[in-house]
Image (tube, rainbow, N blue to C red):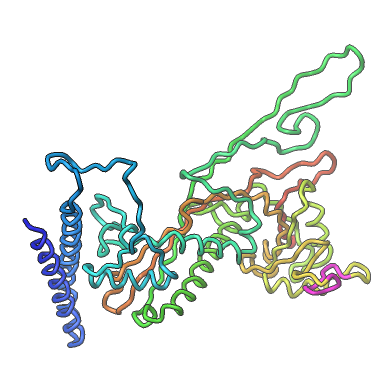
Amino acid sequence: MSLKKFYDATNVAEAQVQNIASQINDLFELGKTDEALALRPQLDQARTDAHEAHRLYISMQAASLPQEGSDPARMMVPSIENVRVTLDEGDQKFEDIGKFFMAVKNAALYPGRTDPRLKGLWVRDAATGMSESVPADGGYLLPQEGNATILERMYAIGEILRRVARDPVSGNSMTYNAVDESSRIAGSRWGGVRGYWIAEADTITASKPKFRQIELKLKKVAALCYATDEQLEDITNLASWLSRTVPEELRFQVEDAIIEGDGLGKPLGIMNSPCLVTVTRDTATFIKAADVMNMWARRWIGVKDYVWLVSPDAEAQLPQMVIGNMPVYLPPGGFTGALYGTMLGCEVIPVEYCQPLNTSGDIMLASLSQYQTIDKGGAGIASASSIHVAFVTDETAFRFTYRIDGEPTWDSDLTPLHGSSTVSPFVVLGSASA
């Protein structure tokens, strides 16, 4: 078959796509929704055929190019010395995320006119259901530049995410070795190590540490959003909207899991961790200075990065706490001109993940460096788009997924050397005693 025949076949296939798409649009305008939807499988198949015809044409075009000094009976394999790398349209980057989304929309409607910059973003596989190799079955991968932008902003605006320990992983899990220590009493430190003061020639009793393992396996959090054709045409508006809303929603889901996740398909939250210390509230209807001081006394003194996480309605009670004539809480911009309010020298951060006022967990003292997370560092936010999910409403669906897991590095609270009350890097104010 000549090259012209492949070119003609491509034009015929693309004309078939446009013909079926026009029929569907006409049916929708006439209010014949059922008939329009019945043609959708034909449109999907026509798009697939057009894509295959275009691919064959490009392949035959490349194979027909003459090569000086080549042997027609052998494959044309240029030597390394003669290879020159050139950048064509397909090697260029999209100016912004909005232009990428518009290119996806146009490629789905007119596959023969697909933006060459999308070619390298297709993932080909043998999927029998949804896939990313055919636009009708899934969509295009978001360019890596967009992925990194979303991930970077998600951490920048997250008061909790930017404070926890984080390790990117290339696989799906990470195992950490940790000292299994639940007491600082002699014979229990470091899980069983013990030192002795000895006299000359005395015998030293042997001891050994005890270890445990923390295994984190990536979980998936996702956001699905839709954009109308009008939004796609307003590229600047769309880029701004997506870069604002998607990171915010993913951040919300992840930070909420860090605080109160049950560990089932999501990170294990601090509130459900066995290392959490709960201090009994003095009064059922009010947060007192004594409550805050009792929480402070139950913190583990091994770190200095504590913050107070409080529900917004609990924050309103903090300015009323005093010890003698001295306020316990200093509001933002107080004596020190600080960005955050402070209490006992630690930042006070209002977050909506804390429990309602006067319930267990409405205020938390936390060293978030003692919470370990892993995420898919190389991939960042995985994204795909499709016009077929909401075809009848002229909307394009954009899906964003982020893989992460986490849990506190402590598996129990700690008994100090002296004193009967245990300590922890995570302390909450509980309910009042009956």
Q: Quadrant of residue 248?
A: bottom right
- Horizontally, is 351 left or right of 172 in the view? right
Is residue 332 part of the magenta span, yes or no? yes
The quarter of the image holding the C terminus is: bottom right
Q: Quadrant of residue 226?
A: bottom left
Residue at the far front: name it: 69
Q: Quadrant of residue 184?
A: top right
Residue at the far top: name it: 201
Visible in this render: residue 434?
no
209 is higher (above) or lower (below) than 63: above
The residue positioned 13% from the left and 43% from the top of the image is 72
The quarter of the image holding the N terminus is: bottom left
186 is higher (above) or lower (below) than 67: above
Q: Which residues are magenta?
A: 327-336
The residue positioned 30% from the left and 79% from the top of the image is 393
Visible in this render: residue 214?
yes
